[in-house]
Amino acid sequence: MTDAASAEPEALTDEAILQRFLRTKNQPTGSQTLGFKMVAVSQAEKSVEVEFDARPELLLNPMKQIQGGYLCAMLDECMSVACMVASGMTHVAPTAEMKTTFLRPGMPGKLKGVGRVIRWGSRVAFTEGELFDAEGRLLAKATGTAIPTPFANYKGK
């Protein structure tokens, strides 16, 4: 018989994880700037669907398109959050490297992001992300490598 203190924590459901993201009072400022909102979670598929509100007053370049660095940040957010979901909300996964391909300009407004973990290992996670405009057209794709780190060990360094 084991005591309650040594018992494994109960696994979170996809809905519980989604609600955790939707109810958070401590959303990172970077996520706030990007207009991040979690839409769907699938632990089985190690994937997330998110929405970004690309506000023109913050994110545009001189051509009135979303500056590419912000699109990269959105893709990074999708892939990083997919890592958290893949871990059952026990790990963060700082990005070690990322490659982005831009397929068309992003315009202000709502964007859909999809992040997936392709392979989750004890030391490395391989990820991919996609961004779509309001009409469902693919804007940009990324692949990344991340370093799974238990929340308890993460020091932000």
Image: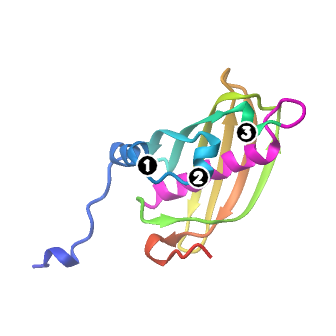
Q: Which mark is residue 83?
A: none
Q: Is residue 42 left or right of residue 147?
A: left
Please, what is the three-letter code of the amino acid marked with disc 1? Ala
For residue 10, what is the image quadrant?
Answer: bottom left
Q: Residues under labels 1 and 3: Cα distance?
A: 35 Å
Q: Residue at x 52, y 65 (%)?
A: 92
Q: Is residue 58 left or right of residue 80?
A: right
Q: Residues under labels 2 and 1: Cα distance?
A: 29 Å
Q: Pointer 3: residues within 10 angstroms few (<14), some, or many (20+)? A: few
Residue 92 is a magenta residue: no
Instruction: Please say if 111 is above or below 42.
Output: above
Q: Pointer 1: residues within 10 angstroms few (<14), some, or many (20+)? A: few
Q: Which mark is residue 44?
A: 1
Q: How is the image coloured?
A: rainbow
Prevalent SS, magenta region: helix
Contact, mark 2 vs mark 3 (Cβ under 8 Å): no
Instruction: Please say if 48 is above or below 54.
Output: below
Contact, mark 2 vs mark 1 (Cβ under 8 Å): no
| Residue 123: image location, x then y, percent | 58, 74
Q: Residues under labels 2 and 3: Cα distance?
A: 13 Å
Q: Nearer the viewer, mark 1 or mark 3?
A: 3
Residue 83 is a magenta residue: yes
Which residue is labeled 2 in the image?
29
| Residue 56: image location, x then y, percent | 73, 31
- First in sequence, mark 2 or 3: give its number: 2
